[in-house]
Amino acid sequence: MKYVDEFLKSPWMTKAKEYLSSPQKIIRMLPDLKAYINKEGLSKVKNDLCLMYYYIKDVATGEYKGYDGTRLLIILAALIYVVSPIDLIPDLVPGGLVDDATIVAWAFKEAYDELEKYKAWKGK
């Protein structure tokens, strides 16, 4: 719980708020995120990452408008964290993706209902 509280007050949440005020920043991040999704060692969260990728893409491009702002911030902050070259455990060291996978899993859990709503919208 301590780490969750710290993450919610982190620079990644601040950056997520900045990105929301300028959707072009989100769009510019998408190629890095797409490359990140294909990294080895992320198989357990790959589907979650893909769903979050399309969610923020559709929000940033204006395709999806029915989003929950708080859940969007959590997802966006988590995705900014994973593509950032600076995180708790550098990705290049053994086990370096563990912190990333943990953040993704937590964000997915926090935003589960929001992402299910998005999937229903996307499936129509």
Image (cartoon, rainbow, N blue to C red):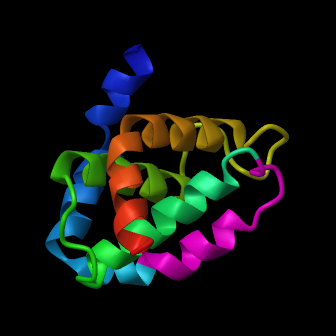
The image shows residue 110 at horizontal and vertical percentages of 38, 35
| Left-right relation of 88 to 69 | right
User: Is residue 10 on the magenta stretch?
Assistant: no
Q: Which range is magenta?
A: 29-43
Q: Residue furthest front?
A: 124
- Image quarter of the N terminus: top left
Q: Is residue 21 above or below residue 46?
A: below
- Determine the residue positioned at 39% across, 53% down: 115
Q: Which quadrant holds residue 66?
A: bottom left
User: Is residue 30 on the magenta stretch?
Assistant: yes
Q: Is residue 11 above or below residue 121?
A: above
- Is residue 89 shown to the viewer in this render? yes
| Left-right relation of 97 to 73 | right
- Determine the residue positioned at 39% across, 15% down: 2
Q: Main secondary structure of the magenta part?
A: helix
The image shows residue 54 at horizontal and vertical percentages of 46, 72
- Is residue 85 shown to the viewer in this render? no
The image shows residue 112 at horizontal and vertical percentages of 41, 42
Q: Is residue 102 above or below residue 121?
A: above
Compare residues 38 and 2 and report the one nearer the observer.
Answer: 38
The image shows residue 50 at horizontal and vertical percentages of 58, 64
| Left-right relation of 2 to 23 | right
Q: Which quadrant holds residue 37?
A: bottom right
Compare residues 57 and 22 and report the one nearer the observer.
Answer: 57
